[in-house]
Image (cartoon, rainbow, N blue to C red):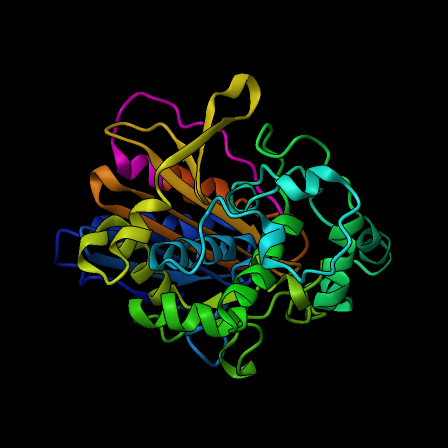
Amino acid sequence: MTSRTAPATTPDAAFALRLADAVTALDAPDVVLAVTRHGRRTTVSGGNALAPPTPRHALRYELGSVSKTFTVLLLAALARSGVLNLDDPLAAHLPGGLPLRHPASRRITLRHLATHTAGLPRIPGDLIPGALLRPYTDAYATYDTERLLRTFARTRPHHRPGTRWNYSNFGVALLGPAMARATGTDCPALLTRHVLGPLGMHGTTLGPGDPGTTAVGHRRDGTTPVPGIGMGPFVAAGAVRSTPGDLLTYLEAHLDPERTPLRLPLRDVQVPQLRRGPRRRDTHTLTWFHHPAPGGPLLFHAGATFGQQAFLGFHPASGTGVAALATRRGDRLRLVETAYGLLYELAAATGSRPARVAEGRG
């Protein structure tokens, strides 16, 4: 096991052992659990595969749907700068000649896309056959932006925009070309300029990086590597790769926005926007899932690719953030439940039971 923890003589030693036990209990080739508590960091890594040449805590991991929190933070930053408005119609930031077949499509706003209330399906229907036939290939990469927009133009929203929550990679992906058209700059450059650079996240990228510093997942046989996912024009929905250290920086920015250049956007993305789930018991912000917890809300997002899994969560009232990353063999890995439970435990030691959280592919 590779670890970066406080020395055993410090008060943090017991906590480091708690994290080490959690890492050991997870059946994954590579695991990293990283925690920040009022700016004090503890990171423990391990796994049941041979340690890679680059230490696990220094690798860059695929975040899957956790990438959406970066995209929507970028959207909030652009809104605060006046480049666009969250309630702008999506159609206002798409090519003028795009023939939208359904009137409801013209009522979809950027806020609807960010909050999964646009009425769009999880993924475009014409992407499903390829994904089923080739489950370990990057089906998103078969698209280009033009095809993405054409598919949107002919897709009928499942419900009136703004009335129901329905998780959609398709919807968040459309924020990419919308922001690019509003600014004249592509999504990766925008993210670097307005989010990653200001927050000092220099180990975070969109798309594949240096193979020697990038974590690699495997198929169920444990030996066949899963190629890195590029996401094609769906980069806004799931293409971010990051290091555990950068993710702690990201969480600390959300925990203390006043100390960052993105003070207002970081506050904006934490404001509850809607109620969702059975009997509308769950809350969702502009981008984060929002659950009740002792002392105040717990905000989180999970993501997965074919060979990796990620979780980010934070509890503002206790100044606590948890980043959990892992490579995997197949789909069975309890990383999200473990990390969510750890965050809830750190938020407060009470008799309350945390809400159930489901894992999913990004």
Depth check: 152 or 293 in front? 152
Q: Is residue 238 visible?
A: no
Q: Is residue 205 visible?
A: yes
* Residue 99, position as x, y percentages in the image: 78, 54
Query: What residue sits 38% from the left and 49% below the top?
Result: 21
Q: Is residue 99 left or right of residue 349?
A: right
Q: Position of residue 109 (x, y in %)?
A: 56, 44
| Residue nearer the viewer, 229 or 27 | 229
Q: Is residue 89 magenta?
A: no
Residue 80 vs 358, above or below: the answer is below
Of 54 and 233, the residue lying toward us: 233
The total number of labels drawn is 0
* Stretch in magenta: 343-362
Q: Residue at x 30, y 20 (%)?
A: 351
In the image, what residue occupies the spot 64% across and 70% down? Answer: 230
Examine the image and state in which quarter residue 278 appears: top right
Q: Is residue 348 magenta?
A: yes
Q: In which image quadrant can residue 75 be found? A: bottom left
Q: Is residue 161 above or below residue 7?
A: above
Depicted 78 relative to depicted 213: above or below: above
Where in the figure is residue 11, as x and y percent of width and height? 13, 51
Q: Position of residue 65 (x, y in %)?
A: 55, 53
Q: Main secondary structure of the magenta part?
A: loop
